[in-house]
Image (cartoon, rainbow, N blue to C red):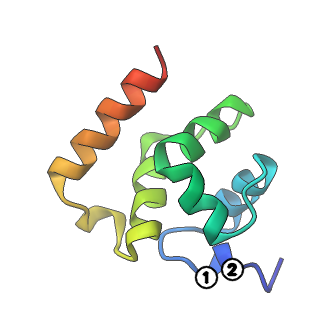
Amino acid sequence: MSNDELLGLRNLGKTSVQWLHATGIHSLAELRKRGPVDAYCAVRARGFRASKALLFALAGALEDVHWNQLDPEYKARLLKQLERQQL
């Protein structure tokens, strides 16, 4: 896993990358295609106890910013999308 491109993304560590692999996400392109909310839901559906910080970490990884620097309105939209997807 040392050459894994996901490990090179901001906010993602070994555990979160392993969780993504378990859901079938193995590349940046696959993560972009799924999007942060769907990827987060897939991780949770596999039974991993990921907090909402992972949702923001995934979004930040796609934007190449630390998740704490994401726009608060964007975070709110992500949470609304997550709520709709979980219904």
The residue under the point 25% across, 62% down is 70
Q: Quadrant of the N terminus?
A: bottom right
Residue 4: give x, y in percent of width and height.
Answer: 75, 78
Q: Secondary structure at mark 1?
A: helix
Which of the two residues, 36 or 53, is positioned nearer the viewer here? 36
Q: Residues within 10 Å of mark 2 (few under 14, many from 20)?
A: few
Q: Residue furthest bottom?
A: 3
Which of the two residues, 81 or 50, is positioned nearer the viewer here? 81
Q: Secondary structure at mark 2?
A: helix
Question: Where 54 sits versus 49, above or below?
Answer: below
The residue under the point 65% across, 73% down is 6
Q: Residues within 10 Å of mark 1 (few under 14, many from 20)?
A: some
The residue under the point 41% across, 31% down is 82
Q: Quadrant of residue 40?
A: top right
Q: Quadrant of residue 63?
A: bottom left
Question: Where 66 sits versus 24, above or below?
Answer: below
Residue 12: give x, y in percent of width and height.
Answer: 56, 68
Question: Where 45 sits versus 58, above or below?
Answer: above
The residue identified by callout 1 is 8
**Residues under labels 1 and 2: Cα distance?**
5 Å
Residue 39: give x, y in percent of width and height.
Answer: 59, 46
The residue identified by callout 2 is 5
The residue under the point 70% across, 69% down is 27
Disc 2 residue type (three-letter):
Glu
Q: Is residue 9 left or right of residue 61?
A: right
Count how many numbered circles sit on residues in the image.
2
Disc 1 residue type (three-letter):
Gly
**Res. 71 mark:** none
Residue 15: give x, y in percent of width and height.
Answer: 69, 59
Marks 1/2 in contact by CB < 8 Å: the verdict is yes
